[in-house]
Amino acid sequence: MEEMSVTRVALLGFGTVGSAVARRLASPASFVSPVSSEITLTHVVDRRARVKQSASGLPSSVLWTDQIDDVLASDVDIVIEAIGGVAPAGEWIRRALLTGKSVVTANKQVVAREGASLWRLAARQGRQFRFEAAVGGAMPIVRAVADGLTGDSLTRIVAVLNGTSNAVLSQMDATGCSMAAALADSRRRGFAENDPSADLDGTDARAKLAILCALAFGIRLDANDIAARSVSSLGSDDFAVARRNGRTIRQLAFADFDRGTSTLGAWVAPVAVDRDSIFGRTVGAQNVALLIGEHAGEIGIFGAGAGGDATAVAIIGDVVSIARDRAAIVPPPRLTSAFTLRPSIDSFEDAVVPTLAFAEAV
Amino acid sequence: MEEMSVTRVALLGFGTVGSAVARRLASPASFVSPVSSEITLTHVVDRRARVKQSASGLPSSVLWTDQIDDVLASDVDIVIEAIGGVAPAGEWIRRALLTGKSVVTANKQVVAREGASLWRLAARQGRQFRFEAAVGGAMPIVRAVADGLTGDSLTRIVAVLNGTSNAVLSQMDATGCSMAAALADSRRRGFAENDPSADLDGTDARAKLAILCALAFGIRLDANDIAARSVSSLGSDDFAVARRNGRTIRQLAFADFDRGTSTLGAWVAPVAVDRDSIFGRTVGAQNVALLIGEHAGEIGIFGAGAGGDATAVAIIGDVVSIARDRAAIVPPPRLTSAFTLRPSIDSFEDAVVPTLAFAEAV
């Protein structure tokens, strides 16, 4: 028999995502994994640890604290960062790596801003920094781009990366309601925050697109440099017009990299897409991405893009990957800033996207 | 600066897939990979080595031979098996692992039959046995199931796994032609073999489905035990009837595992699917798979399922994964034979599949 070691996991943040992760980790039967290591949740760090602990339903063996230092000084192997936001999340991730822990995060803003230095730090430390949950919810797009499609040479990404705006826009399309009504509905379903501006104006999707550009094209792109138009001013009239033309409206994230000239076009914006395209058929909080390579053409992936359970699936997948091979080498992408960014998103609506049908006939 | 080591690669078989792989390996700029290791093709083994070498266009540094022992006795790090068929491919893979090489293969028959013992052997040897290309062509479904979705608990797979039959069936649907005419067209496009029976009768898809069942459900399933109906007797009349009902016909591979009772249903058969479903919209040599989990719902993946270039993308991705981390631990799935196989495929056509639309509204 193989020896059963224990992988100790600490969780930072017990909100929607964190509590979903904790519930899953507390019932090992909920994920089937050929790991010769038992995965055990040992710590939860939350500002409101005392209040949340009693209602958590977690085993009493879990140590609750509001002090990150309790985790950093412990013998945990993996730190899951699920507090969100830039600070203190980025600093806590860095300190966890510096104290010899591997880190799993769902934090797209931290990965987009500090990913390059964090994965170099992880490599230097002989630890892992994984962030499948930062892009695309449960769909394993980070692995697809960083690992599965390294045998191709990717040139273009066209995607729906923000579940909240997609839920709102597809609701407006389906019911003819106003954006305010669709937002209220998404809040009831748990997909929209009280302040949805980061979703609607593209801030969230830009961070995710910057991460994908780093992995797919090897470029260091500041998410703030990605052109963006908000979907927030769209009304039912816009959907009526689109519908008359056989279209609907989606928030698309687009990136196109010409390796010959090192020129990147990248934007996040509302686009009138064919109703029959894979984007038009992506409804609710789903995400979808087309990854286009020089050799294999279009590879598509879709799935639940938002929600605690979907994000927990991606986080736990990363935890399992680390538990399987704690000494795995995850080489940091070599990123270059030597590229030209095409400045505008002029006229892309007619030029590029609506012609992408779901599948081209061979 | 990091040290640049060399990963030596031998290629077995210089047919459609092998030659596509060799062309790509010979032009390293054709894949971008953060690997601190130069990947070099050092050997090609082919029965007709002498004839093929001169027209190959490969560098003269590549050693051509018709003797597998030349590779086994060499210092190559990775052996790519692209000869296909069960013998001698399975034996050569085993001998390569025994002599300390890692192995990459596209051979679904060998993986379906001998995968369990080969990946245990690889683990014992401290080497890797990878087979992304064995299922789904370029789409990274092996990684999605074996790695990316380990955070879920998969319960169902519904997929188009055979590019040839899909090209034939979608051609019959689009043009109203006979199967013989569609087959002739697919042969011209390079998607159908002279003898397409393994594609049409489901032998190919059953092997792929058995592999996915091992990875997704942890069960040891003999591909020959998977129920199958051939698509070969379908004619233009069948498509006409399907069309009148808003449907078309696809060869679907289906598996459904009830973990509570350890009961598996698994079959490969022609199914009348909604024209609007993701299966109906999968045309030509594309593959598509829906992976349904308890926690994240449907995750879908699609892409080029056949052809030398698509298969080469998956093979080279595996080579890059090994070159990145030659000491990586790829834990063999723990497989059990303790499950009950539901014997029939009765009435699935109306019961299960046509209700699966592309995306359910949230």
Image (cartoon, coloured by chain):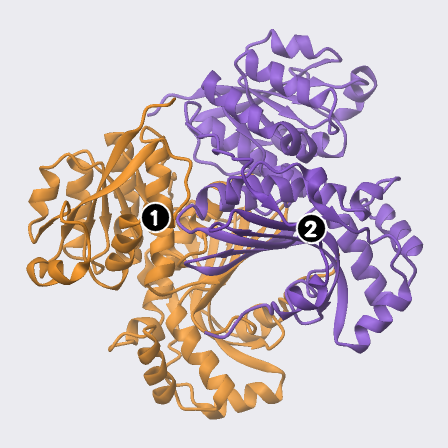
Chain colours: A purple, B orange
Measured from the top left, where is residue B277 in percent x and y?
A: 61, 71
A197 displayed left or right of A203: right
Q: Which mark is residue A267?
A: 2
- Inspect this view and state whether residue A56 appears: yes
Residue farthest top in this picture: A73
Q: Is residue A178 above or below residue A148?
A: below
**What amino acid type is highlighted by mark number 1?**
Ile
The N terminus of chain A sits in image quarter: top left
Nearest the eye: B286 or A71: B286
Measured from the top left, where is residue A39 in percent x and y?
A: 53, 25
Q: Is residue A48 above or below residue B51?
A: above
Measured from the top left, where is residue B86 in percent x and y?
A: 20, 58
Front label number (1 vs 2):
2
Mark 2 nearby-residue class (10 Å; few <14, some 14–19, many ≥20): many
Alpha-carbon span between mark 1 and mark 2: 30 Å
The C terminus of chain A sits in image quarter: bottom left
Marker count (numbered)? 2
Displayed quadrant of residue A69: top right
**What amino acid type is highlighted by mark number 2?**
Trp
Chain letter for mark 2, please. Answer: A
Displayed quadrant of residue B128: top left
SS at mark 2?
strand
Residue positioned 63% across, 41% down in the render: A210
Residue hosting label 1? B316
Q: Is residue B132 above or below residue A317?
A: below
Displayed quadrant of residue B136: bottom left
Nearest the eye: B267 or A333: A333
Query: Are callouts 1 and 2 both on one chain?
Result: no
SS at mark 1?
helix
B100 displayed left or right of B202: left
A47 displayed left or right of A3: right
B362 displayed left or right of B159: right
